[in-house]
Amino acid sequence: MANQNYNPFVNAQTQFDRVAEILELDQGTRDLLRQHCQEIHFTIPVKMDDGTTKVFKAFRMIHNDARGPGKGGLRFHPHETADTVRALSMWMTWKCAAVDIPLGGAKGGVVCDPRTMSKGEQERLCRGYIRRLKSLVGYNIDVPAPDVMTNGQHMMWMLDEYESIMGQRFPGMITGKPVGMGGSLGRTEATGYGVIYCLRECLKNMNIDITKTSASIQGFGNVAEYAARLYTELGGKVVAVSCWNAEDKTAYTFRKLEGCDPAELAAIKDAFGSIDKEKALALGYEVLPGDEWLCQEVDVLIPAALENQITPAVFPKISKKVKVLCEAANGPTTPDCDQLIEDAGIMLIPDFMCNAGGVTCSYFEQVQGNMNYYWPKEEVLEKLENAMTKAFQNIYDLAQEKKLYMRDAAYVVAINRVVNAVKLRGWV
Ligand code: GLU
């Protein structure tokens, strides 16, 4: 569960303010970039299977669209708030700029728990979301995608609703679609693989052999699963994986010191990333408390769940062995922990660089949709690998050259690109 003692939007603004200071941005530019171009708050009435109507609170926000249409996922989560969506859409602006794709930053959320909803209820919720937003989304306005607890099927229902209203086909209106329905091969793997492309480059720069490293991962949704798979393929050892258990309303850490098998764990997880405890025990995994993932004697920590997980309160539990903190989640570290990470000499791969593989592949999905010609998976992954490697190295080199903390270096690269765009447009 997200740590509710921290407000992610305050965190996002704090990170921005720090780098705005380094870059000596003028007040107008700061005012523009620490707020949103557009915020929509609305409700979606849904007829539930039992005949009652339930009203869900929903959001869609565009932080900045100077570099291109708004782009970003849609989360279904019982703890979604306006401020989580504000933070996440702001991070999307930096993410798209960090990998230099021509898109702006946006995000959406619905306060709901799809784990407790039938398929029909989820479909009606998705259609209701788009009915309300129909004139505010579109391939050249704002393009949603999957995120926490949403998937290709949700995207498809939304696209179908949009196209039914418009009376035309608009495959570029949404990304993360199923393959064969305008989706890109490799999209499912893209975010997790992107995380590991960054980690691989980072370890190379640090002269560390990936095959001699071990990692502990928080989360086992789509991002964590594919990160675990590629890391293992490259010779790394995943020692522990932690995930939320909806039934017990708590998290568990699943540990196998000789190395977890990601495919084996994927086979015993549900659609929302919860691993079956009994089956894991039968496969020889130790089942430990949820926060144990953080205390493992590993080289790499990969938080791949929600925001605000690494705080000064839990930082002392991190092993001295940890060399790299690989932020696969959005905003997993609170700003008051950055100094501790830097002082401990832990190399950071900051979130909006680390997890940019998903949106990069969404961009490829749009390009393929525009051509109506789809690339083989190898081609998609090769392009993704090139884009992620180049963007990571650019940020790493800047950090080395200017002796900057990696998060600050990533922000410098991203903010400079966005500032250039708003200046060229004459907004500031
Ligand atoms: N939800 C993903 C993210 O946070 C992907 C967004 C997209 O593809 O637009 O980066």
Image (cartoon, rainbow, N blue to C red):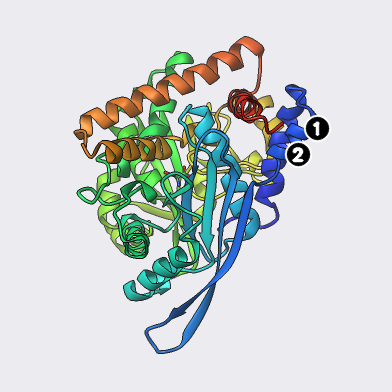
Outermost residue on the bottom side: it is 51
Disc 1 to disc 2, C-alpha distance: 6 Å
Which disc is residue 31 wearing?
2
Question: Quick check: 314 left or right of 50?
Answer: right
Question: Quick check: 10 left or right of 278?
Answer: right
Image coordinates for residue 59, horizontal then vertical, percent: 56, 60
Q: Are marks 1 and 2 in contact (CB under 8 Å)?
A: yes
Q: Residue at x 44, y 67 (%)?
A: 131
Disc 1 residue type? Gln
**Quick one: quadrant of the N terminus?**
bottom right
173 or 110, nearer to the observer: 173
Image coordinates for residue 44, horizontal then vertical, percent: 51, 72
Q: Residue at x 38, y 70 (%)?
A: 122
Q: Secondary structure at mark 1?
A: helix
Image coordinates for residue 143, horizontal then vertical, percent: 44, 48
Residue with the mark numbered 1: 27
- Total marks in image: 2
Which disc is residue 137 wearing?
none
